[in-house]
Image (tube, rainbow, N blue to C red):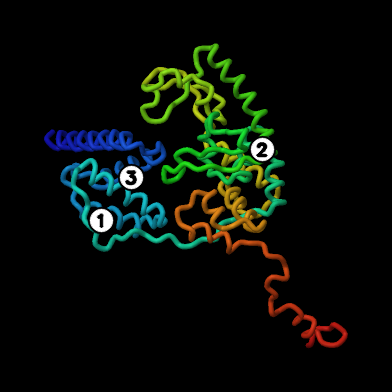
Amino acid sequence: MPDATASHLRVHVGDVALKRMERVLRVQYYSARTLEAYLGWVRRFLHFHRSRDARSLGPEAAQSFLSMLAERRRVSASTQNQARSALLFFYRHVLARPLPPLEGVTPASRPRRIPVVLSRDEVARVLRHLAGAKQLIAMVLYGSGLRLMEALSLRVKDVDFARAQLVVRGGKGDKDRIMVLPAVLATRLGEHLARVKRLHDRDLAEGAGNVALPGAFARKSPGAVRAWEWQWVFPATTIYRDAETGERRRHHLHETAVQRGMREAELRAGIAKHATAHTLRHSFATHLLEQGSDIRTIQELLGHSDLETTMIYTHVLQRGADAVRSPLEGLVELAAGPGGASPE
């Protein structure tokens, strides 16, 4: 019986710590995806040390958990770094005991990888095998260079047809930036928004039509939850009821639906590359370089804080057949000897 009580108290302490961490993350306006990822890592961390409660976990506990991820789980560098960031946040803001430098555990360096890039013809073939909102989202990724979640998080007010631009708000690193809106995309996007407006009007007539708003904006401007300008550009096909407010809302289209559509289109197009929705953004940057665009302009468009991140696209440029001539060229004919026959 005492053992069961102790176990119950440990679980309770862990639950309290997680709830407190969630509150702190929300107060500091961390994105929903970061919130979910950080809570997931701390939950796994507490489960790994299930014989101890959160208040008694010292630096050595964090060190052993991160070492386990690297040595036994063999997680990628980006995964290890995310787990480390979650624990640093947990110790500083929840336990109020910032972690000292962890001996033997340093932030993992991510190996440099050449991104997968589609040719213009391959992009066209993928787009032909997409339809509806998924095709339009793919066009936004390739035509404007947005990340998938940046495109899905667009609101009606972020589309500026007069200036031919899209406004990305709170992108990676919580940065805003302005992206180009190609004329061909503007036409299709205008037709799409007309259909979305009819859907929103129908939702309002049925007592729905609400949308989630950032931060505390819903309290500051209560009418904004039903306002047209705050609606998602790419709304989901179904309505849900928010557990906290009871409002009937539409979320934006889920990223997995786009990823599945992209994979299916790639297979139907017969493209033998592991292309994802993010590949369209890589293709946008590479094709701009091929057209002679300045590398620093592309850096700004992509929202990269470091030029070195953008420079990766210079390694995948298509410079034409005569840019680099292999020493094998012409040698095969010489090796064949007179008459074209290969020597015995």
Horizontal side of 52 relative to 322 (left or right) equals: left
Q: Neighbour class for label 2 at 10 Å: few (<14), some, many (≥20)? A: some
Q: Position of residue 340 (x, y in %)?
A: 85, 82
Quadrant housing residue 264: top right
Task: Name the residue nearer the viewer: 177 or 122.
Answer: 177
Q: Position of residue 257 (x, y in %)?
A: 56, 36
The residues tagged by marks 3 and 2 sit, at their Cα atoms, a distance apart of 40 Å
Up the image or down, 75 lies above or below 39; here it is below
Q: Amino acid at mark 2?
A: Leu
Q: Does residue 248 show up?
A: yes
User: Which secondary structure, mark 2?
Assistant: helix
Horizontal side of 306 relative to 191 (left or right) equals: left
Residue 63: mark in rendering = 1
Q: Position of residue 13 (x, y in %)?
A: 20, 36
* Residue name at image x 57 percent, y 41 percent: 259
Q: Amino acid at mark 1?
A: Gln
The residues tagged by marks 1 and 2 sit, at their Cα atoms, a distance apart of 50 Å
Q: Amino acid at mark 3?
A: Trp
Label 1 or label 2, whichever comes before in sequence order: 1
Residue placed under numbered mark 2 in the picture: 185
Q: Position of residue 301 (x, y in %)?
A: 54, 48
The residues tagged by marks 1 and 3 sit, at their Cα atoms, a distance apart of 14 Å
Residue placed under numbered mark 3 in the picture: 41
Residue 98: mark in rendering = none
Tell which residue pokes out farthest to the front in this image. 163
- CB atoms of marks 3 and 2 within 8 Å: no
Q: Does residue 256 show up?
A: no
Task: Name the residue nearer the viewer: 180 or 205.
Answer: 180
